[in-house]
Structures are given as structure tokens and as C-alpha cells.
Amino acid sequence: MERQSAADGTGERTGTTALDAEGPSSRRDTTDARRHIPRTDVVLRDPRLSQAARRLGAPVVKEAVRRAQEQAREGSIAPAQVGDTAVALLPSTAGGLRSVINATGVVLHTNLGRAPLSAAAREAVQEAAGPTDVELDLHTGVRARRGRTALRALSEQVPSAAAVHVVNNGAAALALAATALAAGKDIVISRGEMVEIGDGFRLPDLLVSTGARLREVGTTNRTGVADYAAAIGPETGFILKVHPSNFRITGFTRAAETGELATLGVPVVVDIGSGLLAPHPLLPEEPDAETQLRAGASLVTASGDKLLGGPQCGLLLGEAELVRTLSRHPLARALRVDKLTLAALEATLTGPPTPTAAALAAEPAHLMERATRLADELSADGIDVRAVESAATVGGGGAPGVALPSAALSLPEPFAAVLRTGPVPVVGRLEAGRCLLDLRAVPREDDKRLADAVRSAARG
């Protein structure tokens, strides 16, 4: 009994020791580890983070520290790594938008912001970010016309436009024209041009919202000048001709030309959509502002962030009196662009070729050379990748049906999601069970960033 009692006592003590070794001791180690996680105020003293707080703002930096501390609590990083992890988690800017590499093969991808700005346009935006002379004549010290130099640059690019005006997007340009010229009146439009574009936006809904009435003429596939002529009357505000930018109707078709409509005695407004100011050799079927005005259009509306390669804005070009009427309408004030847009637009018009122009002009052979070089480099790292031929598109509602021969890196399908969510987001496309990274819209100077992103994705 005594031995048993001793054994019981020993066992009791031994049991307690065993629990310390396997249970509570382990919990105590975890607790101790958590106690080593540095406090927020200590982490924020890191010079890298204090400098970032001045650049990005304290809340952004504190959030990065909080996320790093949470990783330490979960055990995914050591407490000593909190500072380095917080630095790695910092965004590049205080804004929520992230720069991505557009490897989709769509040059003007609406979901990716359409046209990327040129280096000249970015510099102009940076210069205009502070106080500027946007509405001040520095020589006389009196108020001046807003955006005068940008408007002058636009006029010089389209000689057939007697006057020009800029609003905040392409839809706004058309809405201003309808409001100022046809509120309470008829807009005569072909049934084949009653279009719907991305995100369920329907052109007829926009036009009706301005107080105008739509007078539909012709049929879906055939509308001649006689159809328009029969609909014109005292209540006609203008004829509207819309380029069906995101689809094509082929076969038994007929569409009245701008020159024919210009003979009917009422203003002709042509919405070319894509923002092409002059004919482009690679896009012979894409309407441009200069050609439409020479053919007799009274007013041309277009977007600035498509084939023009500039910032989001709406362009109005045409007869002086019409443009003057639009620019002085009360709605014009609500639709005007800011100084940053004016700066980017002017630099786009007067500066070197834009990234959009470069992407359109890229030679397929050169694209394949880049793809082959990148594929060889990545294959040497053990990555399943090969260079393949590809077909890119213009996008942004421009040149529907036009294929641009291109080249791409072909990777296993799982790479798509990993690349898209990586430190440098790369957006490609899935095709035949593979992830394709099309180089048509990727500048050559981004090749290293693209390759590094693929290596990072391969490491998981």
C-alpha cells in the first residue's frame, strides 16, 4: 500500500511533468512566441515604415503592420519578421487601383482602363497635379479659356473641325449634343444602329434621357438615305449616325453614307466611338473624325481613351456654331474635364507615339522573337512554357472582327489565377486549356517584369 501510495504519488507527479512536456508546455511556448510579436508602435519606428507613412498615410501603414502581426499570430511568419512583412505588404500608392500587365491580347481592354497613357502624358499629369494656369493668362493676369492649349492641339490634329470641345467621356459627348440640339425634338436614327455596349449600356436609353424623341428608320440590316429623308420634318433636331463598334452585320446590308445624309438639310451628328482622328492603315474600315467631317458631318463625337490612346474624355468636333452652342449649354459645366485630363490629352496629341499606337504597329515577327526568348529563359528554370502564335484584338469597341497576328507565352491553366493575384498582377487569357500571355499590348520594357512574375507564380 505504501509502495502503491508512493507509486501513486510518483505517478501523480510524473503525470504532471508529462503534461507540461506535451500540452501546457507547448501552449506556453506558443504564448511565449506570441509575446515576442512586437507592438504596433515599436514596428512603426522602423525607418522604412515611418517614411512610408509620410508617403502613403499612417492608416495605410498601420493596416500593413496589423496584417503582418496577424500572420505572426497564426504562425505563418516568425515574430522577428513582422517588420519586413509589413514593408512587403505596403501598396505602391495610397490609392486602391493596382498597376497590372495587360497580357490579354486586347489592346484596349475596358476592364483594365482602356488606353495606357504615354510617358509624356504621365509627366504632364504630374506637372498639372499642383496649381496650374488652367484658367489664367499668366501674361495679362486675367481669366483665360479653360484648357485652351489642349483644345488648340486637338484642332490642329483635325483640320476639318472648325471648333472643338472636350467633356468627360464619349457618352457625355453624345448626351450633350442630344440635350443641346434635340431636347423636345426628334433624333432620326437607323434601327441597325440602336446599339448596346458593355455593362448593359444602351444608346437609345441615353438619348431618351436627354428629352429627345427617337425616330427609328429602316431595318436592322438595311437603311438607305430615302428612309432618313422620309422621316425629316419641322421637329427634327438632327440625324444621328452611329458606328456599331462592337459588332458587325454582314450579308444583305445597306447603310447610308455621311455624304448622302449631309444633303438632307438638317445637322448630321456622327458618333465614331473609337476616337480615331485620321485614317489608320491597319484599320481601313474604322471611321475617323477627319474623313467624316470632310464628308459633310456637322458634328463628330468620339472617346479619347480608345484609339487616340489618351485619357478618358469625350471629343466633340465640327461646325463652329454647333460646337459653340454645346460648349455654352448649362450641361457642359457638369460634364467638363479637370486639369489632369486636359494635361494628359494635350501631351497625347503633341507627344511621341502612344503605347496604343505602338501596340497596334507591333510586328508579329518581333513579337514571336520576344516570346521565344522569354520561353527559352523560363524553360531553363524548369517552367512548362512555350512560345505560340496568337490572335490579338483592338478592343474598346474599336475595329470589330479585326484580328491582329501576335505571339504569346503558353503556360498551364493554373498559372492564370496565380499570376492575376501576384505581387505584380499579370492578366492573361485562357484558351484550349492553357494560360496565354499575349505580348501585343505588353511593352518590350516590361518583359523582365513579366518573366519575374511567371517565375514567382511557378514557385507558388
Image (cartoon, rainbow, N blue to C red):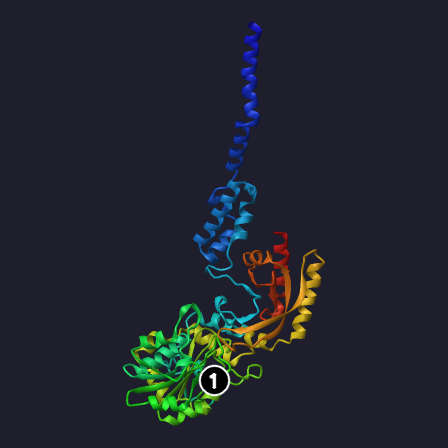
Image coordinates for residue 47, horizontal then vertical, percent: 52, 51
Above or below, 393 against 15 in this view is below
Image quadrant for the N terminus?
top right
Q: Which residue is mark 1?
A: 253
Image coordinates for residue 116, horizontal then vertical, percent: 52, 71
Is 184 left or right of 162, judged from the image as shown? left
Image coordinates for residue 389, horizontal then vertical, percent: 65, 70
SS at badge 1:
loop
| 183 or 380, nearer to the observer | 183
Above or below, 411 against 170 in this view is above
| 66 or 387, nearer to the observer | 387
Residue type of the residue flagged with mark 1: Thr
| Mark 1: few/some/many CA within 10 Å (<14, 14-19, 20+) | few
Image coordinates for residue 182, horizontal then vertical, percent: 31, 83
Farthest top residue in view: 1
| 416 or 353, nearer to the observer | 416
